[in-house]
Image (spheres, rainbow, N blue to C red):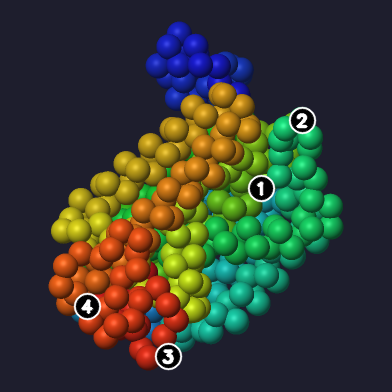
Amino acid sequence: MIDVKDCFTAPIGQFCLPGAFQQGWIEENPMLDTRIVLACALAAGVSAIALFILANLAERLGLVDRPNKRKLHQGNIPLVGGLSVFIGMLVAALWFDGFSYFVKMLLATSAVLALLGALDDRYDLSVRARLLVQTAAILTVIGTTGVYIHSVGHLFGHELALGWLGVPFTVVAVIGLLNAFNMMDGIDGLAGSLSLVTIGAILLYSNAAQMHGPTALMLLTGCALLPYLAANLGLVGRKIFLGDAGSMVLGYLFAWTLIDFSQASPRHISPIDVLWCVALPVLDTIAVMYRRLRQGKSPFKPDRGHIHHILMGAGLSSRRTLVCLIALAATLAFCGSVTRMLGTEVSLLAFGTLLGVYVVMVTRIWLRQESRRRGLVGPPAANDADITSSGRNPMLPSTSQSPLHGGVQAE
């Protein structure tokens, strides 16, 4: 854990990578340092080449995103960004070598999920089929490595062990984070940029002293993301979308890396720190699912209720929305790094309070925006008892089709 005074007394570079500098990692392991740099360059290079090749094959493979009632983009956009990121990361990881059995199983099951995501992009698989394969991949990692969430941390003087509940809790946690990143892939650059913020938070929180295992895998993933982000934001070449193959694999890798770091002995990060590393995706997913369930809808049914939709509904452009959300995600990660210095209990209380405020605030703003879209005269009531022109509360279940089903922008 970083002492508060280190923020003011340590050299600039030392605070950025505290563990590496404090333990003399760079000076003591020059060859390993060179290899990780070369591996990162290889990840970015292979990812760029794969992006170019797959983009030209996308139409023939059927991996394109076509405009519809929920999607306003122009023309067919290749859905190969995630595949290129995974290929770049995988090739670099195989070259770097020296990974533990856990990381090798993580890569193997990630390949299965990348294929699942590509098939979903191509054939629009059912939620049940996706959940079945995702659960099988998670159980495979647990069964072959023994890594899972066996404790939620040391709180109030006690270690809160989960016992036999650890395995199902791990399945739910991984699937939850996996889908959280999938749901945040709604505007150009958002999922990829949030991934970079998450990687940075993981490296900062874990105080990583050695660039191997999940730490190295995070660095390789971050470098493999760069070519895709450049294309997705329109900085180079044609526009490319991440696709389910990308968002699914990224969430899966982050979930298992955080589990490994928080369950190791000794711990690299506390289980509460995990929440702060992925704060924005977790907060928004919980808020959206709460609202959908309260409306009597499937929590997996796409709509225009995510934070990026709300900001754009308030008049922000997609680029300004992206900047605001990345700044928010980075701020949340920083706030978590401050609260952890005050103790695990304080950090948990702070996150719980933030979650409650976020859910209430975002839900009310969405209600007001929906009321305006439905043509209400005047603002909704403060108690959210909003009545539409048809006399129905939009938060109550409905048997008729809601405008959400015909939203103009995908998640």
Amino acid, disc 3: Thr
Residue underneath mark 1: 259
Residue underneath mark 2: 157
Mark 4 → mark 1, Cα distance in angstroms: 43 Å
* Mark nearer the N terminus (3 vs 2): 2
Residue 86 visible, this angle: no
When the figure is inspected, residue 394 is found, relative to residue 16, above or below; the finding is below
Task: Please report the residue visible at 84 percent of the width from the left and 52 percent of the height from the top.
Answer: 163
Which label sits on residue 399?
A: 3
320 left or right of 302 in image: left
Mark 3 → mark 4, Cα distance in angstroms: 17 Å
Task: Please report the residue visible at 25 percent of the width from the left and 65 percent of the height from the top.
Answer: 380
Amino acid, disc 2: Gly
Task: Please report the residue visible at 53 percent of the width from the left and 84 percent of the height from the top.
Answer: 126
* Mark nearer the N terminus (3 vs 4): 4
Residue underneath mark 4: 374
User: Where is residue 75 shown, x and y percent of the image?
Assistant: 21, 79
Q: Nearer the viewer, residue 229 or 316?
A: 316
Quadrant location, the C terminus: bottom left
User: Where is residue 161 shown, x and y percent of the image?
Assistant: 80, 45
Dot 2: few (<14), some (14–19), or many (≥20) neighbours within 10 Å?
A: few
Outermost bottom residue: 400
Q: Would you say the residues marked 4 and 2 are in contact, meaning their CB atoms lie under 8 Å apart?
A: no
Amino acid, disc 4: Arg
Which label sits on residue 350?
A: none
* Mark nearer the N terminus (4 vs 1): 1
Disc 1 or disc 2, which is closer to the eye? 2
